[in-house]
Image (cartoon, grey):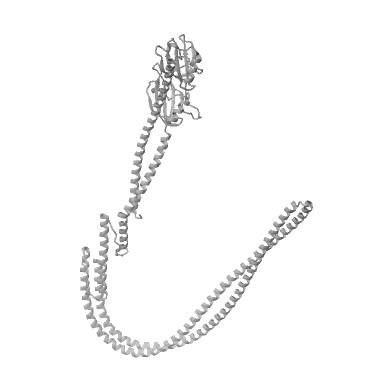
Amino acid sequence: MNTRIGRKLLITIIICIVLASALISTIILFTSSSNNDTLMMSHSEIGLRILQHRLDEQQRRLNQIVEDMIETNTALSDDENTIESFWNTEKESDFDFAAVLNSDGSVIMQSDNYILSDFNLSKVGTNGYSGYVSDSSAGITMQSVKPLSNGGAILVGMYMNRDEWLDGIKAEIDSELTLFHGKIRFATTLMDSEGNRAVGTEMPSYVASEVISKGIPYNGMAVLDGQNHYVHYLPFNDINGKVAGAFFSGSSSAHVDELQLTMIIIAISVVVVVVILSIILIGALLSKSVLHPIKEAEKLAANMSKGDLSVDGQEHKYGNDEIGDFMRNLQFTVKTLGEYVQDINHVLLGMADGDFTVEPALQYLGDFSEINRCFDKIENSLTEVISTIGQSSNDVMTGSNQIAEGSKVLADGTTRQAAAIEELSATINEITNKVQSSADNAAEADKISKESSGKIEYQNTEVEHMLKAMDEIKQRSDEIQNIIKSIDDIAFQTNVLALNAAVEAARAGEAGKGFAVVADEVRSLAAKSSEAAQQTGELITATIDAVDKGTEIAQNTAVIMKEVTELSERTSSYISDISIAAEEQADAISQIKIGIEQISTVVQQNSATAEQTAAACTVLNEQSVQLENQVTKLKVVEAKHITEQ
C-alpha cells in the first residue's frame, strides 16, 4: 500500500481497532478484577467459617470429655491417679488442661499445665457452662464446666494460643488466621518482616472500633506485612455475653495480582493478535477494493499526462461500487480519447500526403464535435489556396522561358568553366590520394606506437615480477640461515646430552635408568634435526624455483626489448614516407593556383549574362510575392484552427 490515501485509511482503521480493543480489554479487566475481588472475599469468609467450625468441634470435644468423666464416675473418684490416667487418654495435645475440685473448692486433680487464676466454684452455678473465658493469667481459653453431685466441679479446657494448630488450618484453606484477645493478637499465622509471629500486635483502630467496641463484623481490604489482603473480622463473646475478642481470616491478593497480571498479558496478546489479523484482513480488503483501483487510476492518469492513451489489455475485475464505476468510466474515456487521436492522425496524414478528400471515420461526441467542422474549414481553405497556386504557376512558366534564353549564354561559359574544373578536380584527386596515403602512414605509425607502449608496459610488469622474485629469493635465503642455525643448536645440545648419557651410563652400571632418559632426549633432538633438515630441503627447492622464475622473466624482458627496437625502426620509416608525401602535396597546390586563375576569367564573362537573368528574375519575384501571400493565408488558417481547438 504505497498510496497516500492507503496509508491514511490504514492508519485510521488501525487506530480505531486499537482503541476498540483497548476499551474492550479494559472493560474485561475491570469486570474480571471485580469478580476476583468477590471470589477472594468469599474465600476469606469461608476461611473464617472453617475456623469457627474447627473451634466448635473443639468445644464439642471438651464437652464430650466432661460427659464421659461424669458418666464413668471418674470425676467423682477421690483418687487423683485414676482421674489423671483417664485424662491422659482423653486429652488431644499439651494445650488441653483439666481440673477436678471438691465441694470446698480444694483441688483433687489438675493437669500439669493448669495455670488458670480466675476459676472458682462460684462461677460454675447449677448447670455449669461452656464457651470462651478470659483469664487474667491464661488469656482466652475454651472451657467446659459441669457441677458434680458431691458439690464439686469438673473443668476441661483448651488454651487458645495454639499457633501451630492455626498453621494446620491455614495449610488446608490457604488463608491467614488470627485469634484476638480484645484488640491484641493472641494466636496468629501472620509473620512480621523479621519472620516472627505477629503475636501481641493490635488490630487497626478503625477495625477495633467496629468489631470490639460495637461487636459488628468487618470485611474489606487491609495491608498486612506490606501485602494487600481480603480480610474478615468476626467478634466472639465470652460466657458472660461480652465481646472477648475476634476471629480473623485474610487471603493475600498476591495470587490475584499474579492472575490479574497474567490476564493483562493475555488480554494484550489477544489484542495484538486481533489487531494484526484485522490489519491483514482490512489491508487485503483495502488493497483489493480501494487501493488497487486507485493505483490503476493513477497509472492511467500518469500515462495520459505523458500522452499515452493506451489502455492495459488485462481485464481487471472491479467491484460494483462507486470506485468500480469510476474505473470503468475512466478506462472508457481513455479508450475513446485514444480512438479520437488515431482518427485525427489518419485525417492529418492524408492531408500531409496531398489527399484532401479524407474524412473522419468517427462521429465525435460532446465538445469534440467541433473537430468535424474544423476539418471542413481546413479542406475549403486549402482548395482555394491550391487554385490560386495553379494560376500563379502559369505566370511562372512564362518567366521561366526568358530565363532559358539567358541560360544558353551561360552554357558556353559553363563549358569552359567545366574544363578548368576538370583540371582542378584531377589535381585535387591527386592531392587527396597523397593526403590519404599520409593519413594511412600516420595511422600505422600511431598503431605501432601504441604497440610499443604496450610492450613497454609489459616489460615494466615483467621487471616488477623479477624484483619480487629476487625478494622472495632473499627471504628464502634468510629462512635457510635461521634453520641452519637451529640445526647447529640442536647438534650442540645433542652432543651435550650424549656426554651426559655416557656419564650416567658409567655411574649406573647395569641399572641404566639415567641413560634411558638421556637416550630419549637424544632421540627427540635427532627428530628435530631431521625435521629442520627437511624444511631446509624444501626451502632450497623453493629458492631454486624462484631463481628459475627470475631467469625466465629476464629472458622475456630481453625479447620484449628486441621487439620494441624493431617497432621503433618501422616508425622511423613511416615518418620518412610522410615527409616525402608532404613535398609532393606542395607541388599539387601550385597547380591548383593556376586553375583558380582560369576560373576567375570565366566568372567575369558570366557576370554580363547574370544581368540579363536578373531582369527575368524580377518577373518571377512578383509571382513569388503572390505565392507568398497565398502561403501566408494558409498559415493564418492553421493558426486560427489551433486557437479554436
Where residue 123 appears, as percent x and y from the top left, is 42, 12
Q: As rendered, which of 444 and 474 lies closer to the eye?
A: 474
**Residue 491 at x, y percent in the picture:** 73, 59
Quadrant for the N terminus in the image? bottom left
Quadrant of residue 155 in the image? top left
The tally of labels here is 0
Q: Is residue 305 above or below residue 148?
A: below
Instruction: Tell me if residue 482 can be seen.
Output: no
Q: Is residue 27 above or below residue 606?
A: above
Quadrant for the C terminus, please: bottom left
Work out whether residue 355 or residue 161 is closer to the camera in this orientation and state it: 161
**Residue reaching furthest to the top:** 104
The answer to which image quadrant residue 303 occupies is bottom left
Instruction: Name the residue rendered at 73%, 57% in the picture.
Output: 494
Who is closer to the viewer here, 480 or 78? 78
Quadrant of residue 606 in the image?
bottom left
The percent coordinates of residue 73 (x first, y second) are 44, 14
Name the one closer to the observer, 474 or 496: 496
210 with respect to 519 (left or right) = left
Q: Position of residue 427 (x, y in %)?
A: 44, 87
Q: In this view, does 216 lie to the left or right of 507?
A: left
Answer left or right for 301 relative to 512: left
Does residue 433 sit above or below 196 in this rendering?
Answer: below
Residue 201 against residue 288 in the figure, above or below: above
The residue depicted at 51 percent of the width and 77 percent of the height is 447
